[in-house]
Image (cartoon, rainbow, N blue to C red):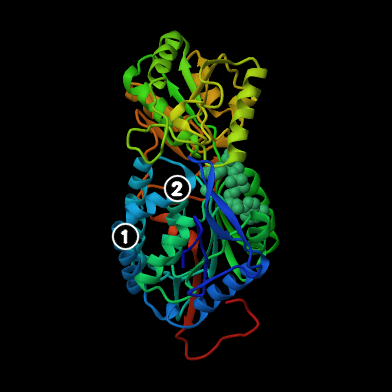
Amino acid sequence: MDIPTGTLTKYRMFIGGEWVDAASKEHFESDNPFTGKPWALIPKGGAQDADRAVRAAHKAFTSGEWPKLNASKRGALLRKLGDLIADKAKFLAEIEVRDNGKLYAEMSAQTAYMAQWYYYYGGLADKIEGHVIPTDKPDMLNYTRYEPLGVVAAITPWNSPLLLTAWKLAPALAAGNTVVLKPSEFTSASVLEFMKLIEQAGFPPGVVNVVTGFGPDVGTPLVEHPLVAKVAFTGSDRTGTLIYQTAAKGLKRVSMELGGKSPNIVFDDAHMENAIKGVVSGIFAATGQTCIAGSRLLVQRSIHDVFVEKLVAFAKTAKMGNPMSLETQVGPVTNPPQFKKILDYIDIARGEGAKPVLGGGRAARPECGDGWFVEPTIFTGVKNSMRIAQEEVFGPVLAVIPFKDEEDAIAIGNDVVYGLAAGVWTQSMRRSIMMAERLQAGTVWVNTYRAVSYLSPFGGYKRSGLGRESGQEMIKDYMQVKSVWISTATEVPNPFILR
Ligand code: NAI
Ligand code: MG
């Protein structure tokens, strides 16, 4: 499927079990963020391709082998897929790094860990049980069944392409749905490579399909398609809002994992070295390109100056450069629009009167070559009302905001439209429990940051999203419940009365 043309690898989409070009026959280039140069050609899909993929998925949902498979057999397929992923994790990580510029160290850990979602939901597939209802009606059996929804459209961003796909695909398939994936136009290659494993695992044709291209060209027709039952989305809140509106017209279900402006809150009783590591991991890991970035550092006033001084000294040592090198700690930004956006926010923060105490622009280090690198940047003197404290930058830019006491920390922490995550650094148990209760966020970490698992629900409060991913409960978001009534009466009573 990947035919080298010159130096560029040319990809095809995967629809109905076949490798196909876009109806337009056109391709677009995908860049390597480290070299700043294109390395792959991706099919430029449009409405016709979206329609073809949804029809293939709908056919696979309603006929052929898939609907006949029982839940245990679906689970076995998912576990087989997990094994294939574990086997190919390094290769998949290399593709991710080439396309999105994140560190090989991070991406190889992610692709290896990703197998767990397929194992977990594979195991869960045959444990979703309906109930026999203790009915109040005489001579009646009433029970419930959990059934799949139909065709799920999964639309994903560029920061963790395969992992965020797994969060949607594994539960969707375990529940018995069929899926059309639409990866980000900046990072489509890894999901296309991953389809080879879907083939090898033996999923019937059409159960998993991929269309590639730009949001408005192929994403919108996918969301609008009458045969799509649910849209599972991760990305910006702007695009999420658009998709929600479009999906509403067709009364489709949605799940949304959107952005964040998460507070990482350091109290004066915190273990300082640990807190510094946690703050750095929250904002400079993955070059700040994560929805859970701890992009607001709230520091108790009494330790503000000494904490910032130590933080800057540590962050300064971060090694930048080739993301494939295991030495590198901060890699490039994934794409030019994002690169520009981050630099613009640095200017905005300066304009608002925030003071850069580290970085503050493009990284022009020799080891960064022509790549899209931004210096790890820390601003002090930030007020929570500033744009740099309210808007998602999605880059290595930290806004430091001092606070007085617990009430102040809670008020500032919650004073944003988002609510994806929050970090708390303290040695007090009382404070840990109280803060975990009062912070409005889908995830609260105490004395740690960036922990996620297939076992634990993940998602946002407020504008950070709708619904959850991972964990047991959310599989029902990919299902619908049916109530079945069976009369055991020998005679149907008065037909003019509600039973
Ligand atoms: P985006 O939210 O626009 O794109 C995410 C996905 O949605 C991509 O696959 C895109 O093609 C698709 N899409 C775009 N418009 C669409 C439409 N009208 N209908 C259907 N699908 C559509 O994110 P983008 O442009 O890649 O990044 C912009 C900003 O989003 C970033 O600067 C960052 O702030 C935020 N972001 C947040 C992420 C998160 O994990 N919460 C991940 C990536 C970006
Ligand atoms: Mg790319």
Mark 1 is on which residue type?
Tyr
Q: Position of residue 326 (x, y in %)?
A: 32, 37
From this view, report whether residue 489 is shown above or below residue 403: below
Question: Does any atom of ligand 2 lie closer than 8 Å to the CB of label 2?
Answer: yes
177 or 93, which lies in front? 93
Question: In the rendered image, which residue does mark 1 sit on?
Answer: 119
Q: Residue at x 65, y 48 (%)?
A: 241
Disc assigned to residue 98: 2
Query: Can I make out residue 449 in this image?
Result: yes
Along the polypeptide, which appears first: circle 1 or circle 2? 2
Q: Is residue 24 left or right of residue 186?
A: right
Residue lying farthest to the front in this orientation: 6
Q: How many marks?
A: 2
| Residue at (55, 51) in percent of width and height | 30
- In the rendered view of the protein, which quadrant contains the C terminus? bottom right
Q: Is residue 162 above or below residue 263?
A: below
- Residue 294 on image: x %, y %: 47, 30
